[in-house]
């Protein structure tokens, strides 16, 4: 059947197989897929097999004394949070959506607004079970099969099928977040705010306007778990796009208005507030198919990280390049990562600043912009996030990910994806 | 405490039902399945979801009449029983069933014969205590034979006729017989159909309908409900037309 990833850039024929904890699969070369939230081709394998993990949906253990959770890899973070938050625990690290599986969170070594406090999802993993296509099963942890463990965290599914994992939780007193939102006028102010939030704020993120003359302004948001339970009622809201609009709703005509509108709306709301964790951490989850707003041609997400020493100048240069390109991004997100070096050989984060931008796919002109941005990223010692990538070149990957040749030793020869063929040659 | 036996407890629909029941107060779930390993997997999952739930499990060969009788004796004697849901079943492709008589025999043994092995002694127990609900999972595929899955369909039609007979037999008693006819549901059993991109109901939705229907003692539950209407039409299509359709 035809399968697309979150970016909707392609829709090609795949052989779909539902796998289980015994890693039942055909002889076809395949790639595991969880909830399909990778933007590019990390979980695509046109002409080959996709192993869906939806049947790996069992919880295994919840140690409420130590704060440890164990489950199968197809369980979503949403299901886990729905269970553990009312019982006083939370996941320390989640991405901008709850609709990812545990397997996907490990394989992409996802990060979130709490990176400066807790690191990546992989940093929380105590152990994981890996099934290889040769039929073997391996328990991997920092102590046991530690090299395979490091290759699997952030290994975009190429080392085997993660069937289950055990990971650490953090205490949580309520589902509410005490948040503070501050408008800023330029990048220097953003970096000041980030610095002052590194300690004392569990999570932080900024939205930044990268269109027109006011580019560089934005809204800085930081939050801490609320100390006690609020009695406010939460409205369960789930909107959706019933169909894909014929053209991207984010386009030249709407972009400036969207960005200006978003800035002023949030500027007006600036200050302290208490918000539910779902609307604070996962605002886009309220719209089930928000990726469709970019129309039938889909969209790219470009997420880079730039090390500290070049962070401000390179970000400035990238913003200027975007502004002069005529391509624009509505959802531009900026965050300063913590100092923790991630465990995975192919993990994305490094100490520095990460910028994530969404661009409607306008073909050659969009790709030309990316080539210019790539040049800045490479020159500044940064790299791109594989979970979002659909088009990085192999030389860029090899230059910016220093552990590639070490990683290759741990690949499962029965596994391949469109991304692995593009970036690793097989 | 209400005792609920889920027979074929590791099936997708059964697990979805168990997750709902386990969250209710004062319930003991008795999970009956063919593999202790898989029963433990399901049981651990339920205990994480609902730490207060009381979960037992029992491994048995579903097509061995003596083993099933011993299982029912043990369960009714040890815990008592108020509701039994038979949810086991297999659905090999018709192509495989047509070419492998052994597989066809196994399919009928599990889908058609096994429910009677469980139901008769359970109903004997219900008769003695003068209450109880026996729920059986049939299928919309049992409503009319189709070339794509007629042996599976026939094995489920057996359940429908069997359930109708039981409803007749227990009509004047407090004992309820519930026949459930799910449409295609996204579980392991339909993996190949899902892989072809056929739309499926979510097991959670089907489970809600089943649990509601069991609590009301409905005679027949189509789930999702739209299938009641669809099958009413499908049953009435004249054979000369039906046989020319390709589905």
Image (cartoon, grey):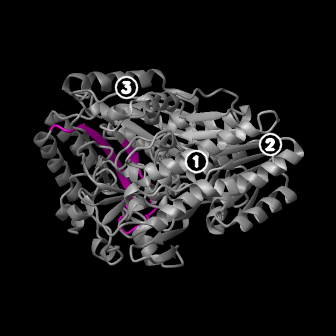
Same subunit, labels 1 and 2: the answer reads: yes
CA separation in Å, label 1 and label 2: 22 Å
B4 in magenta:
no
Q: Which residues are magenta?
A: A334-362
Residue nearest the observer in this picture, A108 or B63: B63
Which badge, 1 or 2, comes first in the chain's sequence? 2
Which of the 4 quarters of the picture holds residue A110?
bottom left
Q: Which residue is mark 1?
A: B158
Circle nearer the viewer, 1 or 2: 1
A353 in magenta:
yes
Where residue B97 appears, as percent x and y from the top left, is 42, 60
10 Å crowding of disc 1: few (<14), some (14-19), many (20+):
some
Where residue A323 appears, as percent x and y from the top left, is 19, 35
Q: Which residue is mark 3?
A: A263
Where residue A189 appears, as percent x and y from the top left, is 38, 38
Vertical comparison of A210 with A402: above or below: above
Q: Which residue is mark 2?
A: B132
Query: Is label 1 in a helix, a strand or a loop?
Result: helix
Circle nearer the viewer, 1 or 3: 1
Circle nearer the viewer, 3 or 2: 2
Residue nearest the observer in this picture, A199 or A372: A372
Which chain is indicated by disc 1?
B
CA separation in Å, label 3 and label 2: 62 Å
10 Å crowding of disc 3: few (<14), some (14-19), many (20+):
many
The residue at 78%/48% (across/down) is B123
- Direction from residue B26 to residue A117 in the image, left or right: left
- Direction from residue A124 to residue B126 in the image, left or right: right
């Amino acid at each position: 059947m035809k399968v697309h990833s979150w970016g909707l850039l392609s829709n090609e024929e795949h052989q779909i197989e539902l796998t289980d904890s015994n890693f039942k699969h055909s002889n076809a070369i395949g790639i595991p897929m969880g909830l399909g939230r990778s933007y590019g081709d990390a979980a695509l394998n046109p002409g080959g097999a996709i192993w869906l993990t939806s049947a790996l949906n069992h919880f295994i253990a919840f140690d409420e004394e130590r704060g440890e959770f164990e489950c199968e890899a197809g369980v979503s973070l949403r299901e886990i949070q729905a269970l553990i938050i009312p019982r006083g625990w939370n996941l320390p690290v989640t991405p901008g959506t709850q609709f990812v599986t545990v397997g996907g969170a490990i394989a992409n070594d996802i990060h979130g607004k709490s990176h400066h406090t807790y690191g990546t999802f992989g940093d929380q993993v105590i152990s994981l079970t890996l099934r290889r296509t040769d039929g073997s099963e391996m328990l991997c942890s920092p102590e046991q099969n530690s090299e395979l463990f490091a290759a699997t965290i952030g290994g975009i599914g190429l080392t085997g099928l993660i069937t289950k994992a055990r990971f650490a939780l953090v205490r949580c007193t309520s589902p509410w977040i005490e948040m503070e939102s501050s408008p800023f006028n330029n990048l220097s102010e953003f970096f000041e705010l980030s610095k002052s939030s590194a300690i004392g704020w569990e999570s932080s993120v900024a939205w930044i306007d990268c269109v027109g003359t006011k580019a560089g302004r934005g809204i800085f948001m930081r939050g801490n778990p609320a100390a006690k339970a609020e009695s406010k009622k939460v409205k369960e809201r789930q909107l959706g796009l019933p169909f894909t609009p014929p053209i991207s709703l984010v386009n030249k005509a709407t972009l400036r208005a969207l960005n200006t509108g978003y800035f002023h709306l949030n500027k007006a709301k600036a200050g302290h507030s208490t918000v539910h964790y779902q609307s604070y951490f996962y605002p886009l989850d309220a719209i089930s198919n928000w990726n469709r707003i970019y129309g039938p041609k889909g969209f790219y997400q470009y997420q880079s990280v730039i090390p500290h020493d070049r962070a401000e100048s390179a970000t400035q240069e990238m913003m200027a390049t975007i502004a002069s390109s005529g391509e624009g991004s509505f959802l531009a997100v900026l965050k300063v990562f913590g100092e923790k070096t991630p465990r995975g050989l192919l993990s994305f984060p490094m100490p520095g600043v990460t910028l994530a931008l969404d661009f409607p796919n306008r073909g050659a002109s969009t790709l030309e912009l990316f080539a210019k941005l790539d040049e800045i990223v490479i020159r500044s010692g940064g790299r791109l996030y594989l979970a979002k990538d659909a088009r990085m070149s192999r030389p860029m990957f090899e230059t910016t990910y220093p552990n590639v040749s070490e990683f290759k030793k741990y690949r499962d020869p029965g596994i391949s994806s469109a991304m692995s063929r593009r970036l690793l040659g097989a | 405490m209400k005792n609920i036996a889920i027979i074929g407890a590791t099936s997708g629909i059964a697990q979805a039902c168990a997750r709902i029941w386990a969250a209710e107060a004062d319930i003991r779930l008795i999970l009956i399945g063919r593999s202790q390993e898989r029963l433990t997997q399901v049981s651990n999952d339920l205990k994480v979801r609902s730490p207060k739930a009381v979960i037992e499990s029992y491994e048995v060969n579903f097509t061995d009449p003596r083993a099933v009788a011993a299982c029912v004796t043990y369960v009714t004697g040890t815990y008592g029983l108020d509701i039994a849901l038979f949810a086991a079943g297999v659905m090999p492709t018709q192509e495989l069933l047509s070419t492998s008589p052994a597989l066809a025999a196994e399919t009928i043994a599990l889908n058609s014969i096994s429910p009677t092995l469980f139901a008769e002694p359970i109903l004997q127990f219900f008769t003695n205590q003068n209450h109880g609900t026996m729920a059986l999972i049939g299928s919309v595929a049992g409503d009319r034979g189709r070339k794509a899955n007629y042996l599976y369909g026939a094995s489920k039609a057996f359940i429908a006729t069997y359930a109708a007979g039981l409803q007749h037999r227990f009509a004047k008693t407090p004992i309820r017989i519930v026949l459930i006819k799910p449409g295609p549901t996204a579980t392991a059993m339909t993996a190949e159909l899902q892989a072809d991109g056929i739309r499926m109901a979510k097991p959670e939705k089907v489970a809600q309908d089943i649990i509601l229907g069991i609590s009301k003692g409905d005679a027949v539950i189509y789930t999702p409900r739209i299938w009641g209407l669809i099958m009413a039409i499908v049953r009435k299509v004249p054979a000369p037309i039906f046989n020319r359709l390709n589905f």
